[in-house]
Image: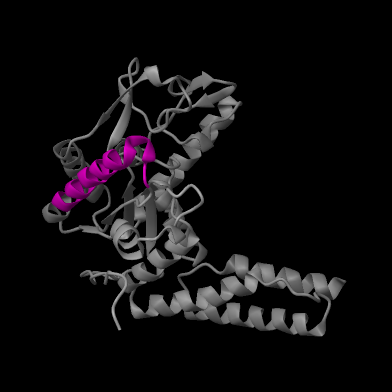
Amino acid sequence: MPRFRTEIQVSKPTFQINYSDKICFVGSCFAEAIGEKFKESRFITNINPFGILYNPVSIARSLEMLMEQTIFNEKDLHFKSGLWHSFSHHGKFSSPDKDLALAQINKSINDGTIFLKNANFLFITLGTSFVYEHKNLEMVVSNCHKYPSDTFNRYRLEVDEIVDQYKNLIVKLLVFNPKLRIIFTVSPVRHWKDGAHGNQVSKAVLLLAIDQLEQLFENVSYFPSYELVLDDLRDYRFFAEDLLHTNNLATDYIWEKIQSWFNDQTKQFCKDTDQLIKARNHRPLFPDSPEYSTFLESMLEKVNLLIERYPNANFINDRDLFTDRISELTNY
């Protein structure tokens, strides 16, 4: 029978990911999607402590600020349209309350610094090689926060610019945390404002830069999420309604492929947590029935077994949830 797609077989690396590893994710919205899959499966994660970032300069600067445990103050914020913004952060950190914005920013940096210091893996997902440089501040911004376009100079980074910046960054990261392994990915989300050709050139710059970095550092690897979506799936069924962002089907496919980098215990761990997730999401037709009570009791028993089987994972919230549901039925 003829083949109708070019399925990519992800090569196995020299390392393996364990369920107890601490994994940090920074970068584009695709980093958030994959990071959430890890988090949902009970991995120990920290996802985008500066919010969603797209360009290599902003991502590198965010990691440097984590290593330096930078503290933001009032001079780092800018007020527009009723909100206080940071040009180093995604809009989710913006707030009408200046003190609240600073508190959220500094707590996230503090938590991110501690996590990065102890992390085993750092996933960096680059989205675009185009940057917006604030003319007055003379800095590449992480988010334009709907400021007028003439506030910025927009240009595309060159391969050598990215490689030079990340060579210095990776050395700093490995001094900061010698056990850290860095995994680059390129987001398959298309930046259509650059046009079809501009988007392709932008992604090509990222791919070439990462390829050079992978050759320079033993602790740097590349996971082909971009190729898996664009060369393997190659179908709009795997994109959202805007036809630019990937949908849950694509994310699930990437998640399945990335498990080839897991050790055997962690693959089993994912199967066990998948059953747990389905049980948590189960909504009974008859919640007062003896059958549902028996189901909850059996799930609580399974959670306790998982706690024994995987002592380095955190199933406390799952245990509390099923305990509370049993208690509610008993009190009812």
Q: Is 205 included in the stretch rendered in magenta?
A: yes
Residue furthest to the left in view is: 216
Examine the residues drawn in magenta and state their main secondary structure.
Answer: helix
For the residue pair 300 and 229, the one nearer the viewer reads as: 229
The residue lying at 34 percent from left, 50 percent from top is: 187
Quadrant for the C terminus, please.
bottom right
Quadrant for the N terminus, please.
bottom left
The residue lying at 12 percent from left, 52 percent from top is: 216
135 versus 233 height, above or below: above
The magenta region covers: 190-212
Residue 225: image x %, image y %?
A: 32, 59
289 vs 48, left or right, is right
Residue furthest to the top in view is: 136
113 vs 154, left or right, is right
The residue lying at 22 percent from left, 50 percent from top is: 174
Residue furthest to the right in view is: 332
Image quadrant where residue 206 sits = top left
Image quadrant where residue 123 sits = bottom left
